[in-house]
Amino acid sequence: MDTVLTACVGPGELAVCVGDLAASPAGAVVNAANAQLAGGGGVDGALHRAAGPGLLLAGRAWVAANGPLPTGEAMVTPGFGLPAARVIHTVGPVWRGGGHGEDGLLARAYRNCLLAARAYGVGWVDFPAVSCGVYGFPVPRAAAIAVAELERGLRGGLVKRARMVIFSPGAAGAWALAAREHLAGPGR
């Protein structure tokens, strides 16, 4: 993975990298999942292909027992064939113009992933750009929301390391810019 930005945040580290999330050796990777935890395209499909059929079966079992995963919530499965020991699944909001609570739901998705990591004793979590693919969330807006939540989680000791692992170098640049701007803000 190519690191675009690394910053010390409280007792932890925030990074933005260009790379393949499915190859991450983090304690957990975050899956930008659909509510049925059924695999799909983008990051979700890549993680399911790399993890093998156990990931799909675990998702189906969870949905059968609990119903669809609500937007903004998170649940955890083993990593199966992934280098990461765990997968934290979250459903980000579909972008509908910004007037339907999308910002709050996206912040909640990142926050709940960090809380899930803490609950499972995971110190290093790698994230994709949740909701920025087929769900259409504007990248600069999503990046600002995500970086703010990751900073809160790092300063609060929920994890020791949070990385945004972005497939496209251009998009990774937007995430790094959002991180620089946020971390250089007042009182930081």
Image (cartoon, rainbow, N blue to C red):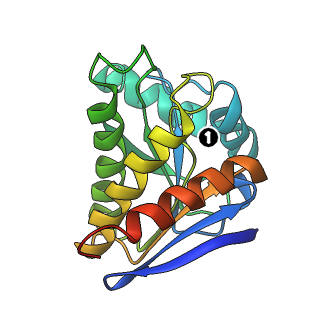
Regarding residue 141, the answer to whether it shows in the image is: yes
* Residue 139, horizontal then vertical, whole percent: 56, 38
Q: Is residue 29 above or below residue 2?
A: above
Residue hosting label 1: 54
> Is residue 84 rendered to the left or right of residue 160?
right
Quarter where residue 187 is shown: bottom left
| Residue drawn 61% across the image and 72% down it | 5
* Residue 89, horizontal then vertical, whole percent: 45, 41
Q: Is residue 84 above or below residue 70?
A: below
| Residue drawn 30% across the image and 36% down it | 73
Q: Quadrant of the N terminus?
A: bottom right
* Residue 172, horizontal then vertical, whole percent: 67, 54
| Residue drawn 75% across the image and 38% down it | 49
Label 1, residues with CA under 10 Å away: few <14, some 14-19, many ≥20: some
Mark 1 residue type: Gly
Total number of numbered discs in the rendering: 1
